[in-house]
Image (cartoon, grey):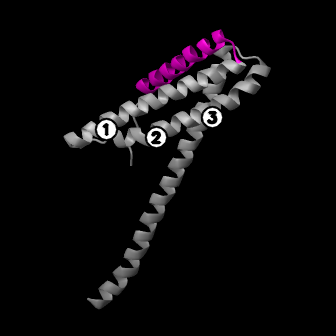
Amino acid sequence: MKKFLNIISPVLMVFLFIVAFTNTSFSQRNEKDKSRLREKLNTHKIAFLTDRIDLTEAEAEKFWPIYNVYEEEKKAIKEDKLVEALNADISEKEAEKALTSIMDLRSKELELDKKYLSKFRTVLSASKVVKLIKAEREFKAKMVGKLKNKPMKRER
């Protein structure tokens, strides 16, 4: 029995090491893929918005730094509360808190939009800001449409 355990123990250790390494490797590759996908999506969004808004080179130079900060702030607000607010199995009391969090989140988003619409107006005409709003909606709809037509990958 001891010989059997002495033989199995190293084999088991190697097996566990391989499993752990493989999971880490898949996880890292998955993060790299997500990062590349985000970059690609962002590049498409920039091209789409630039085209739809019809930005001049001078406007683009001033607009994109402001827009990038806006996107980062918007992302921070959403990530901050939405995940915790929409937890699947919650009590009635937690649901009340979640609803309050969602309303707070929407208020923050509205305030952020107001703040940045004014900033966009410092570098773009009103008509181009309206085109921006329309183009963002078109881009989002286009991406949702692509996702609907794409078969879902199963998570491993």
Q: Is residue 21 left or right of residue 47?
A: left
* 52, above or below 79, in the image: above
Q: Residue at x 50, y 24 (%)?
A: 143
Which type of secondary structure does the marked residue at label 1 adopt?
Answer: helix
Give the amino acid type for the residue marked by disc 3 in the picture: Val
For disc 1, the marked residue is: 98
Q: What type is the residue that disc 1 sits on?
A: Ala
- Residue 23's disc is none
Q: Position of residue 67 (x, y in %)?
A: 64, 28
Looking at the rendered structure, the secondary structure element under dot 2 is helix
**Range of residues picked out in magenta:** 124-150
Of mark 2 and mark 3, the one earlier in the sequence is: 3
- Quickly name the residue at label 3: 69
Check residue 79 in the rendering and tell me which mark sits there, or answer none.
2
> What residue lies at 65% left-to-right and 21% top-to-bottom?
120
> Which residue is depicted at the point 45% across and 42% down?
80
Residue 84 screen position, x and y as percent: 36, 43
Name which quarter of the figure residue 155 lies in.
top left
Q: Earlier in the sequence, mark 1 or mark 3?
A: 3
Label 1 Cα neighbours within 10 Å, binned few <14 / some 14-19 / many ≥20: many
| Marks 1,3: beta carbons within 8 A | no
Tell me: residue 107, above or below residue 138.
below
